[in-house]
Structure formats: C-alpha cells, structure tokens
Image (spheres, rainbow, N blue to C red):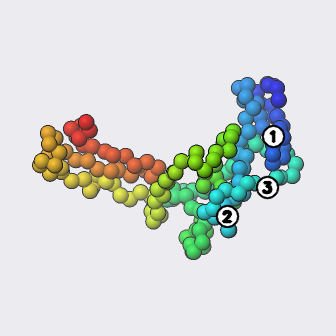
Amino acid sequence: MRPTPTGEHVVVDTSRRAVRGAWREGSAVFLGIPYAEPPVGELRSQAPVPRRPWAGVRDALAYAPKPQRQALMEVTTIPEPGVSPDLAGFASVTEDQLLAAQGGGFPPLDEPSADDLLAVMRAVGGGLPLGPVVDGELHARPVPDGLRAGRAPTSRCCIRVTRSCRALTAVSASRALIR
C-alpha cells in the first residue's frame, strides 16, 4: 500500500479475503470488518468463532449497523430465546448487529496465552423496558453520628444511574464525604 489522495479506495488481502478501505488523512482505514461469526443459535454466549472467508472484495468503508433502538423508550432490543415476539417484534436486528452489540475490536498483533488474559466483568441490567427509573438520591440517607468521625452527620451519599445506564456514579451532596 502507498498513500494516495484522501478518499481514494484501497484494497488489501487479509486472511479472510480482500477488503476495500479508504485513505483518510494519510492512513488506510478499514471499518466494520467482522472478526467472528454472528453469535446466534449454538454460538450464543460462546467464545467467538473465527469468521469464514467471504467471496470477492468486502467493503470496509463504514462500521456495521448498530442495534435498533425503539424511539419511544430508547431501549436497545435484541431478540432473545423465550421472549414473546410481541415484545421483541418492534425491532429488527441483524446477525451483524448482534455481533456489534456483543462487542468487537481490533485483534492483538500477537495471540495472547490464557495466562495473559484478564478477567472482565460486565454488569448488564435488565427489566428496565421503560429506561432507568431508579434515582439513588431518593434512597440517600443521612450518615449516622459517629459512623464517619469528623464528617457532618447530615451528609448524603447515593448512587445515581445515569440516563444512558452506561455508568454508575457515586454522588455526594457534601464534599465532607469525599476525602
């Protein structure tokens, strides 16, 4: 590959076949290349299975579609076994979108050994079809006297679920608790 003017396409061969990318600001950019088969059927909740080679040249000019969001409730819906079609039917999610929802990324240059891998915990909430409905400030209680010596007994501390439900933020109504 050699740099060409921004916006020109570039095709390279990979282990899965050829992909078409574009030059942007002096770098070759390849977006949305699947790293594994979609996690459907027996592959659900299993380790990623390498993607089978494709025929021809695959466009890698844009990321894959993201999971559909229903406009009224702003909830990502992914069909699950045992979920009534009446509940899951308002969203059409493709296999590639399922793959995107479960994550992705760029493969490491060297294959890590099992000893090099770190444990990752991802807490996923459920049962919130109408979005976040809990505000931890409603459950905040004054800190009892003597529990935290030297701090105001009326200080409040709570956990607030952000609107996006992507982060849990500890909130303090008094800087005295944050030392």
* Quadrant position of residue 110: top right
The answer to the question of whether label 1 and label 2 lie on touching residues, with beta carbons closer than 8 A, is no
Quadrant holding the N terminus: top right
Q: Earlier in the sequence, mark 1 or mark 2?
A: 1
Residue 124 visible in the current orientation:
yes
**Residue that label 3 marks:** 52
- Identify the mark at residue 43; answer none if there is no mark: 2
> Where's residue 120, x and y in %?
51, 51
The answer to the question of whether label 3 and label 2 lie on touching residues, with beta carbons closer than 8 A, is no
Which residue is drawn at the image coordinates 71% and 26% (left, top)? Answer: 25
Three-letter code, disc 3: Arg
Q: Earlier in the sequence, mark 3 or mark 2?
A: 2
Crowdedness near tag 2: few (<14), some (14–19) or many (≥20) residues, C-alpha within 10 Å: few
Q: Earlier in the sequence, mark 3 or mark 1?
A: 1
> Where's residue 79, x and y in %?
60, 66
- Identify the mark at residue 20; answer none if there is no mark: 1
> Where's residue 84, x and y in %?
57, 74
Three-letter code, disc 1: Arg
Horizontally, residue 117 falls left or right of residue 139, namely: right
Q: Is residue 150 above or below residue 54?
A: above
